[in-house]
Amino acid sequence: MPFIDTHIHLYAKAFEADRAAAVERARAAGVGPMVLPAIDVASIEQALALCETYPDLYAMAALHPSATKEATEADFQAVAEAMADPRVVAVGESGLDYYWDRSFDEAQHRAFRWHIRLALDTNRPLILHSRDKKGREEVYEDLVRLLEEEQAQHPHGERLRGIFHCFGGPGWLAEAAQRLGFLLGLGGTLTFKNSGVAELVATLPLDRFVLETDAPYLAPVPYRGKRNEPAYVPLVAARLAEVHGVSVEEVERVTSQNARALFDLPA
């Protein structure tokens, strides 16, 4: 069973010069399916175009929380319409971002609620982005609260599921994710010294995780600070195997099985 990169921005400009070569390197490294999150309407279209070019690619549809500040009704309509495409396997990435700009929290909350309902209406997993200043947990508290409220109000609330992308804690968030039916996405930060991610991951069962790169961002050690790419998924897997005291093959099997089941990918 090949590795699955559950979160890669392959359409990013950082791949313009060698996109095809990056895909080839990923295949050579044992990475099979890749799932491309959206950040805006243009990225949905770009992701779908790449799905036409490369086999075993899948897309998501959503507006990144940072994009909701100036999003129009037409943008939301385009996201909703994209869900009819069978290559769109998830709503994402959506969520809350309190790191850069707190001037439009209300708009972020409205947009996030809309994305939660879209995921429930279409029976697709929801891929979550959440970021706050170091040491603050407000964004995670709001994220969980909004998920719980929308789940309780929706007639198909039991469908709620997805991934907490770029998971790094806090510990109580892992418990909330399990309660809500969400997996935890692990990428390059797992390999960062003093990040605290490995220590937290060590306390959680292996079957809670999927692998991701978030490429071109957050490259794992020894490429930290450079452009990330999907061929580096095995480096994350190797660190997860080390943390849990299992083989890389076991990490590959469990995480890929989780991803295939979540996104309903062909075997």
Image (spheres, rainbow, N blue to C red):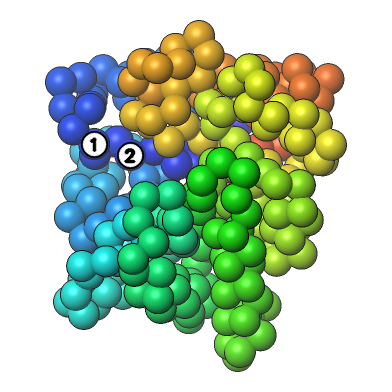
Residue hosting label 2: 9
Residue situated in front as seen by the camera: 49 or 165: 165
Q: Which residue is mark 1?
A: 12
Is residue 94 visible in the rendered image? The answer is yes
What's the residue at 44%, 73% (across, down)?
A: 109
Percent from the top left, x then y, of residue 203? 84, 36
C-alpha separation, residue under disc 1 versus residue under disc 2? 6 Å
Between 262 and 175, the residue placed more toward the observer is 175
* Residue at the image position 21 percent from the left and 60 percent from the top: 41
Q: Quadrant of residue 242?
A: top right
Q: Quadrant of residue 196?
A: top right
Residue 68, x across and y down, in percent: 29, 66
Q: Which residue appears at 76% of the width and 64% of the height?
A: 179
Q: Quadrant of the C terminus?
A: top right
CB of mark 1 within 8 Å of CB of mark 2?
yes
Q: Is residue 229 left or right of residue 259?
A: left
Give the number of the disc on residue 155: none
Q: Quadrant of the N terminus?
A: top right
Q: From what the image shows, is residue 244 above or below residue 161? A: above
Location of residue 249 (image quadrant):
top right
The image shows a total of numbered marks equal to 2
Q: Residue at x 61, y 89 (%)?
A: 153
Circle 1: residue type: Ala
In this rendering, the answer to whether 89 lies above or below 257 is: below
